[in-house]
């Protein structure tokens, strides 16, 4: 017979609680889709989609102050797989780089012993993916290799550094927020430290500058006064005491949506700085009655700000430009409006108390429509932004222009009847805001007016403040195997009892049972328990005792002792007997009480002269089996007599009646049986008493005199024939009752607070709790198995202990955590891919590299099938069934909306690539596929590239939308107009005029040129330039002359002037090319004709992807390019085992794929299909989309 075994899978885990104040800034939402959060010295990894804690990392000895996910800003392959890498820093100056999947520390870094102020990974460079920049107090920035822990360079500065921010548009620009101002670094490099101390600037009041002196006007009030008060500019001189300083600046950050813009966060305002103007161009101020800011997060997909306020409210503010047109400038002071960020949505506030405060908010960097709020009590509130269609012009009453949905989905316009996900990301929810004077006030066809609302989609709640009391439910047996749940009851300081299911680590029930701190819990069945609490003593030392019986199935609670409990000595402990029949209640200065648990009746209240109990434990021995045998024999005899007496009745009727009666009587007797049980206790002298309880009878048994080697007994544990006593001096006394031997062992650990035997027959492991830690002992060998000690290998103090299985212990600690550990009690993190989670988690990073790449290829292209499927089990490729099953689990965990869109036949290849990049959280792939296809398609058509090839290249070419905007110059026009309004000097005016010339705004440029005063040294040149711009003609000779002059000027170092001349004769494309040639990429990107498509063709020619000669053949070029791309893709499919797809794409590659086809045909067991004809290849090219 095969033995029946059951594996209750309980993984080592940590249940966390309230946060330390130093954990305030330790939270990050990574591009991998997961949230990392510091909780004391631990790091939680949270899946925001399912609101589950899927990993807890333990290695730090001090509180974690910073966490940062690494960026996946590289192409993934078998040699560069997907990874979950996290850097964490603590208050002792240690930085640890983690492999989060395995839970192992990959690298440890230590420079100083003070808290790390800030750190970030260097993602915008190709030298290495392991570079980590950290701020070490007080004034050092250090670049580390996060893979090896090697220090690459170190740089010190004059002031204390608080934080830093990288320019997302120019990685060599770094801004440091110091205690006195801002330090701008323009030569940051991974290869060497910055050469100079940077440019130090201060924030000063504009009224102290003569350039801003204006005639007196009527003093504004209310919000206008607040706005004027915070208008500032950047100066190189240290401000006076009256000027605005950075002492109360909370945050500094570059804007990822605007080039050369930065925000400064103050408690009551946000300043938007234009670094080219060195002035504020936008202010978000709070009214006097408003709630101050704590944090702000700028978005990249739209010019929007997520703001966190002191009441826990998260608000979304979207930029609205109210810059007046050139004809309106200078009319009134009110027209000098700046960038305005309108409040578009806000979530509910939380109840703020002394111990409950909002700490930080993080947003999803991939979609930017989800936010996670971290609260000091350990809660993580997951908010998701939703777009709701509204009636047209409904928002005009608020004075704000409406928000409209975009016309594109994943980079291309929506087709009729095409499925989409409106709430996929922020840029699929709202389009770009309309710019006054530039855009038409009416929406485009297909756009809908939308309103934004926050919706609470998840909540993670931690444990309350310690202390805790723990009790694990009765162990697993063969009788309860069908309905057993590993439940842990945690009594808290606020009177509630939290019941956790340790299989998943999730909260099973939260019960508000008591009005004061829970002191102890005892289970009376798998679904009910007793808990007691004591109030604060009064002047007489008396308390209010609460002893409650709780039924988990119904949540019903009732006072077990009835009206008893007011003004009496405090309950010290409660002990339930082994068979859950009896309960002993031990008081501090009062004799104990003995209760019947089944009936809730008091069996005995001991006499006043009863000894004072210091420790008590029930015996595991009882006479239940013998009682059951006696009752069963009696019932059988009764059944036989009944059968003989009724023999005249029908045999069938008699047997049925006797069976029913017998079953009923057995049930009644089993409930009425009162087995004999025993317990022992010790008094203050160490004497051991033995008491027998059977029904209503209580008998005094043997008394054992105290052991001279033991002090006052503090606790007792009894299992089988072994009895263990622990005293206040740290001694353990092991009694072998069968052999009648005892052995005293001094542990030298101080007071033995609690001892518990492990569950399981024959398991003689003993868990011992001291004031400074805990130990596990083997009572058979009388030797210690494992130990933890405060200050030696842990930094927390243990409050309570228990066994959760036969080989795992559970510890409650003063850092607010409950830990489930192996018997070795080493704080080891677990593997994420081995967890038994309640809800499956979409995280391809948990797969093996080969499986993750297979999943990506499967989602993007399925050329072997006419219909797109989400079932990978039917795909013919060589892989283990276990790996296939893991991939299918990931596919099944996708939302129904995403599955529906992926299987939509109208979804083209570009949209599919972008969508898969977004759901795979691919930093590199997402920016790689985020392109504006219209401009690129136009350019390829101009190059006479056939339409099918245009479609293919359009689907695969790239643009980093965060870095370069390939669109109409609407944003540049808006910015120049704003700079015009903020002009304060001749240099600013000249900048505006030059930029207007590059953008083709000649009329306004002439006006600015003519504003130059006569005493200015550039007066004559600007006047001549104005005349040239006004009188320029488009005739052939004049254009030739101007082009020649412009070319000569560029060749002789006058690049800016030559580019302006080319723009005047409508040669902006040539001007852009010159700027690109001379490395002026940022200036080229601001022009109308940033020729990315032509650059792509050049790159193909440079690296041999395309070939050309004097008579360039565009068709040959694109055929060679397509063939090379198809071969490369086929090789990738072969490397991950998708040979069927590899054969198809190698066949489509034509001549370039013949060699690969031969290799595939030689593969053993692979049947090669006939290669398609040239006509079929051409047709397949046209049908790729």
Image: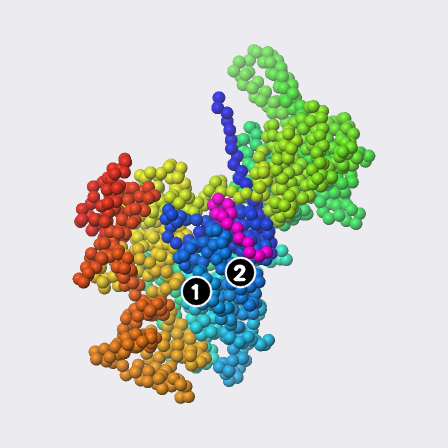
**Residue 335 rendering spot, x and y as whole percentages:** 45, 77
- Residue 10 painted magenta: no
Give the answer, above or below, for where 114 lies relative to 686.
below
The front one of 1104 and 220 is: 1104
Element type at marker 2? strand
First to last magenta residue range: 98-113
Q: Which residue does the image show at 64% across and 29% down from the upper left? A: 780
Q: Choose top left, top right, bottom left or bottom right for residue 937.
A: bottom left
**Residue 883 rendering spot, x and y as whole percentages:** 39, 39
Mark 2 and mark 1 lie on one chain; the one further toward the N terminus is 2
**Residue 139 rendering spot, x and y as whole percentages:** 55, 64
Give the answer, above or below, for where 598 lies relative to 410.
above
Does residue 523 show up? no
Give the answer, above or below, for where 843 lies relative to 416.
above
- Residue 666 horizontal side relative to residue 385, left or right: right
The front one of 491 and 397 is: 491
**Residue 62 rendering spot, x and y as whole percentages:** 59, 52
Q: Which residue does the image show at 51% across and 75% down from the upper left? A: 236
- Label for residue 458? none
Q: Which residue does the image show at 35% across and 41% down from the upper left? A: 872
Q: Are marks 2 and 1 in contact (CB under 8 Å)?
A: no
Residue at the extreme bottom: 1014
Q: What residue sits right under mark 2 in the picture?
A: 135
- Residue 461 horizontal side relative to residue 544, left or right: left
Does residue 3 show up? yes
**CA distance separating discs 2 and 1:** 17 Å
Q: What residue sits right under mark 1 in the picture?
A: 172
Q: Which residue does the image show at 57% across and 62% down from the upper left? A: 138
Packing grade of label 2 (10 A; few <14, some 14-19, many >=20) is many
- Residue 107 painted magenta: yes
The front one of 88 and 199 is: 199
């Amino acid at each position: 017979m095969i033995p029946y075994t059951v594996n209750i899978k309980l993984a080592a885990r940590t249940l966390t609680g309230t946060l330390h104040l130093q954990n305030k800034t330790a939270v990050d939402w990574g591009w991998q889709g997961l949230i990392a959060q510091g909780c004391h010295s631990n790091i939680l990894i949270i899946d925001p989609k399912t609101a589950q804690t899927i990993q807890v990392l333990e290695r730090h000895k001090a509180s974690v102050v910073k966490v940062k996910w690494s960026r996946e800003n590289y192409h993934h392959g078998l040699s560069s797989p997907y990874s979950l890498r996290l850097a964490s820093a603590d208050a002792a100056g240690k930085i640890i780089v983690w492999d989060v999947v395995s839970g192992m520390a990959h690298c440890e870094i230590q420079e100083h012993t003070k808290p790390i102020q800030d750190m970030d990974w260097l993602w915008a460079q190709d030298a290495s993916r392991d570079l980590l920049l950290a701020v070490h107090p007080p004034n050092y920035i250090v670049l580390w290799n996060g893979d090896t822990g090697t220090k690459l360079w170190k740089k010190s500065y004059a002031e204390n550094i608080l934080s830093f921010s990288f320019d997302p548009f120019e990685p060599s620009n770094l801004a440091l927020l110091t205690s006195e101002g801002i330090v701008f670094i323009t030569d940051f490099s991974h290869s060497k430290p910055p050469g100079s101390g940077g440019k130090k600037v201060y924030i000063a009041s504009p009224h102290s500058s003569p350039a801003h002196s204006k005639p007196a006007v009527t003093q504004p009030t209310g919000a206008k006064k607040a706005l004027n008060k915070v208008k500032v500019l950047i100066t190189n001189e240290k401000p006076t005491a009256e000027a605005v300083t950075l002492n109360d600046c909370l945050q500094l950050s570059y804007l990822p949506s605007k080039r050369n813009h930065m925000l400064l966060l103050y408690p009551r305002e946000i300043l938007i700085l234009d670094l080219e103007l060195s002035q504020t161009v936008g202010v978000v101020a709070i009214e006097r009655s408003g709630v101050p800011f704590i944090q702000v997060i700028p978005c990249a997909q739209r010019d929007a700000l997520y703001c966190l306020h002191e009441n826990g409210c998260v608000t979304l503010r979207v930029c609205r430009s109210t810059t007046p047109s050139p004809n309106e400038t200078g009319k009134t002071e009110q027209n000098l409006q700046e960038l305005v960020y309108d409040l578009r949505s806000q979530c509910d506030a939380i109840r703020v108390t002394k111990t409950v405060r909002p700490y930080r908010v993080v947003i999803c960097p991939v979609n930017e429509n989800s936010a996670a709020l971290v609260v000091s009590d350990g809660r993580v509130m997951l908010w998701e932004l939703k777009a709701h269609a509204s009636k047209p012009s409904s928002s005009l009453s608020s004075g704000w222009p409406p928000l409209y949905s975009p016309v594109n989905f994943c980079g291309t316009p929506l087709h009729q009847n095409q499925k989409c996900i409106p709430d996929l990301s922020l840029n699929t929810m709202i389009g770009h805001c309309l710019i006054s004077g530039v855009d038409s006030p009416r929406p485009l066809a297909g756009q809908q007016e939308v309103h934004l609302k926050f919706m609470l989609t998840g909540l993670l709640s931690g444990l309350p403040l310690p202390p805790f009391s723990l009790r694990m439910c009765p162990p697993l047996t063969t009788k309860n195997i069908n309905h057993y749940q590993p439940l842990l009851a945690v009594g808290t300081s606020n009177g509630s009892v939290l019941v956790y299911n340790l299989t998943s680590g999730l909260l099973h029930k939260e019960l508000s049972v008591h009005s004061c701190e829970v002191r102890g819990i005892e289970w009376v069945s798998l679904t009910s328990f007793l808990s007691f609490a004591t109030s604060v003593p009064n002047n007489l030392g008396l308390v209010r005792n609460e002893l409650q019986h709780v039924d988990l199935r119904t949540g019903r609670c009732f006072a077990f002792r009835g009206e008893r409990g007011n003004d009496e000595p405090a309950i010290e402990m409660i002990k339930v007997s082994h068979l859950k029949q009896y309960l002993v209640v031990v008081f501090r200065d009062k004799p104990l009480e003995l209760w019947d648990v089944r009936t809730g009746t008091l069996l005995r209240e001991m006499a006043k002269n009863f000894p004072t109990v210091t420790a008590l434990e029930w015996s595991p021995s009882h006479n239940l089996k013998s009682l059951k045998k006696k009752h069963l024999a009696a019932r059988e005899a009764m059944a036989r007599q009944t059968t003989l007496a009724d023999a005249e009745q029908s045999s069938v009727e008699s047997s049925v009646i006797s069976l029913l009666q017998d079953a009923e009587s057995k049930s009644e007797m089993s409930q009425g049986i009162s087995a004999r049980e025993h317990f022992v206790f010790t008094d203050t002298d160490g004497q051991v008493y033995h008491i027998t309880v059977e029904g209503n009878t209580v008998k005094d048994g043997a008394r054992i005199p105290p052991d001279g080697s033991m002090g006052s007994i503090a606790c007792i544990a009894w299992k089988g024939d072994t009895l263990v006593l622990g005293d206040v001096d740290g001694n353990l006394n092991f009694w072998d009752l069968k052999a009648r031997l005892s052995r005293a062992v001094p542990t030298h650990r101080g007071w033995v607070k609690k001892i518990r035997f492990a569950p399981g027959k024959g398991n003689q492991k003993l868990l011992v709790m001291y004031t400074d830690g805990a130990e596990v002992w083997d009572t058979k060998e009388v030797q210690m198995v494992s130990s933890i000690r405060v200050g030696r290998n842990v930094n927390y103090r243990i409050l309570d202990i228990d066994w959760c299985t036969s080989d795992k212990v559970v510890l409650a600690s003063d850092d607010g955590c409950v830990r489930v550990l192996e018997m070795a009690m080493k704080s080891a993190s677990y593997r994420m891919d081995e967890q038994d989670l309640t809800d499956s988690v979409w995280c391809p990073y948990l797969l093996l590299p080969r499986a993750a790449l297979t999943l990506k290829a499967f989602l993007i292209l399925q050329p072997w099938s006419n219909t797109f499927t989400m079932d990978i089990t039917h795909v013919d490729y060589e892989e283990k069934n276990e790996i296939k099953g893991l991939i299918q689990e990931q596919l099944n965990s996708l939302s129904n909306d995403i599955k529906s869109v992926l299987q939509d036949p109208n979804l083209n290849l570009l949209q599919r690539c972008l969508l898969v990049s977004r759901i795979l959280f691919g930093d590199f792939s997402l920016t790689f596929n985020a392109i504006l296809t219209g401009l690129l398609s136009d350019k390829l058509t101009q190059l006479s590239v056939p339409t099918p090839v245009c479609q293919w290249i359009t689907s695969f070419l790239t643009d980093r939308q965060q870095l370069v905007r390939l669109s109409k110059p609407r944003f540049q026009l808006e910015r120049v107009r704003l700079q015009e309004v903020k002009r304060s000097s001749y240099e600013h005016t000249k900048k505006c005029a030059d930029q207007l010339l590059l953008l083709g705004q000649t009329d306004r440029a002439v006006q600015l040129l003519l504003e130059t005063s006569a005493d200015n040294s550039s007066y004559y040149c600007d006047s001549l330039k104005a005349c040239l711009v006004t009188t320029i003609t488009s005739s052939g000779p004049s254009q030739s002359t101007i082009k020649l002059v412009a070319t000569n000027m560029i060749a002789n170092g006058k690049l800016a002037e030559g580019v302006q001349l080319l723009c005047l004769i409508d040669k902006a494309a040539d001007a852009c090319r010159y700027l690109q040639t001379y490395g002026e990429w940022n200036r080229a990107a601001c022009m109308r004709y940033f020729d990315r498509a032509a650059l792509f063709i050049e790159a193909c020619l440079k690296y041999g992807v395309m070939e050309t000669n004097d008579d360039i053949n565009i068709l040959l070029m694109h055929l060679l390019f397509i063939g090379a791309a198809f071969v490369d893709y086929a090789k990738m499919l072969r490397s991950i085992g998708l040979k069927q797809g590899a054969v198809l794409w190698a066949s489509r590659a034509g001549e370039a794929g013949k060699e690969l086809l031969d290799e595939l045909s030689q593969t053993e067991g692979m049947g090669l299909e006939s290669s398609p004809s040239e006509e079929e290849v051409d047709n397949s090219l046209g049908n790729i989309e």
